[in-house]
Image (cartoon, helix red, strand yellow):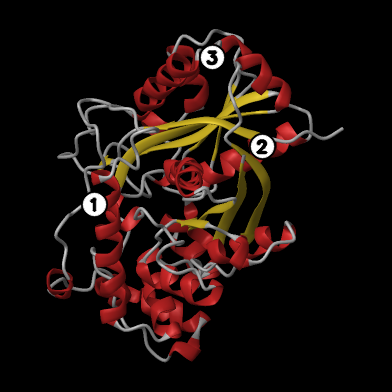
Amino acid sequence: MTSDAYVLDYVRTPRGKGSRRGALHGTGPVELVVALQRALAARTGLDPAAVEDVVIGTASQVGEQGANLARTATLLAGWGDAVPGATLNRFCASGVDAVAQTAARIRAGDLGLAVAGGVESTSRVPMFSDGGPLFCDPEVIRRIGSVHMGVAADLNATLEGWTRDRLDAYGVETQEKAAKAWADGAFARGVVPVAGLDRDELVRPGTTLESLAALEPAFAGLGADGQDAIALAAHPEAGEIRHLHTVGTSPALADGAALVLLGDAAAAEATGLRPRARVVASAAVATDPVIMLTAGQAAVEKVIAKAGLRPADIDVFEFAEAFAALCLRLRRDLDAGPDRLNPNGGTIAMGHAFGATGAVMVGGCVDELERRDGRYGVAAVSGAAGLGVAVLLERL
């Protein structure tokens, strides 16, 4: 017997700069999750003992983010010894995959009430600090053809024929959207202030085409250091890699966390919470690890088709801004204009806390569907090594 899986509520931290100067640097990743668990219980009246599992996505599971952070946080939050916890790693798609897998377990009848989400403290647990062979073993890199995500983004921009002006224009657009969304209170419902921070720290109001045009390409050095050669060996049709992305058109590193409360109809009734959205379907896909970043769009296309829908049926696309080139590609291929694609800005403007990003976007998608009285929304993320995950939501 199958059940529907519903989004009952959602909370997230503001996103802090992923550096020692960031407002959340002094707060460890476990404490970010603990703060959200306590806030979620307080605002919903939830009895933590009723939660059957806590699943947290984290991309760098080492140091402060190692040893099953989800279980550690659940114990520290005072949710009792009987609530399980697990962490998962689908790289940048970890948070959205945590939601997808937990919702699937609810639909299968294995869970009634659960919390899924993600966390990443890039300022305290730096990218690649787990020393994984995909990024740190030269022989594995040679055999697989692994490249840095920024080089992959420039490869995609080259193959698609995007100009620097087009990329910069998208960078300005997402900053303007994010600044307006914060000014309009679009994030007020879900954001829980932490460590004195009450808004996303990375938004840069007043960003202009002129200011972005002055920035140097961010990944030309990596390309010259041998990564262009790896990329061109896999995609010789590119001819050469045009390094076009800058820090203004790339996702900014961030610290942050997000949690989504999921349940079936019986759990909603027992908690007294009105379901906000139904998790219709999810899709996980993979593509070649050098082109890499097209997987998020492939997951979007797959999950829409799985539900028997068309791109035109989707009211909101929350798509992780894994570099401007991939956003322009999705917009073109799915006819997803600025009003539907990341209508409140994205990770280029507000920051990318790897494990948390997908969960942030699921909650943001539900919020936006409610604001515009829309029906269907998709949240999707591209991850390293050519991974992509998408979740399709229906507002109730």
CA–CA distance between discs 3 and 2? 19 Å
Amino acid type, callout 2: Ala
Amino acid identity at mark 3: Leu
CA neighbours of label 3 inside 10 A, class few (<14), some (14 to 19), many (20+): some
Q: Which residue is mark 3?
A: 46
Q: Are marks 3 and 1 in contact (CB under 8 Å)?
A: no
Say what secondary structure mark 2 lies in: helix
Three-letter code, disc 1: Ala
Q: Return the x and y of residue 286 as percentages of the image width and height.
A: 62, 62
State the residue at coordinates (64%, 34%).
Answer: 6
Vertical arrangement, residue 346 with respect to residue 34, above or below: below
Quadrant of the image containing the C terminus: top right
Residue shown at the point (36%, 54%) measured from the top left: 346
Q: Are marks 1 and 2 in contact (CB under 8 Å)?
A: no
Q: Which residue is mark 1?
A: 179
Q: Tell me the distance, in whole angstroms, between the alpha carbons under discs 3 and 1.
A: 33 Å
Tell which circle, 3 or 2, labels the residue nearer the N-terminal end: 3
Alpha carbon distance from label 1 to label 2: 32 Å
Q: Earlier in the sequence, mark 1 or mark 2?
A: 2
Mark 3, mark 2: which one is toward the viewer? Answer: 3
Query: Up-down: is 261 above or below 95?
Result: above
Q: Which mark is residue 277?
A: none
Residue carrying label 2: 103
x and y percent of residue 301 in the render?
Answer: 63, 65
Q: Quadrant of residue 221?
A: bottom left
Q: Secondary structure at mark 3?
A: loop
Q: Position of residue 308 (x, y in %)?
A: 75, 61
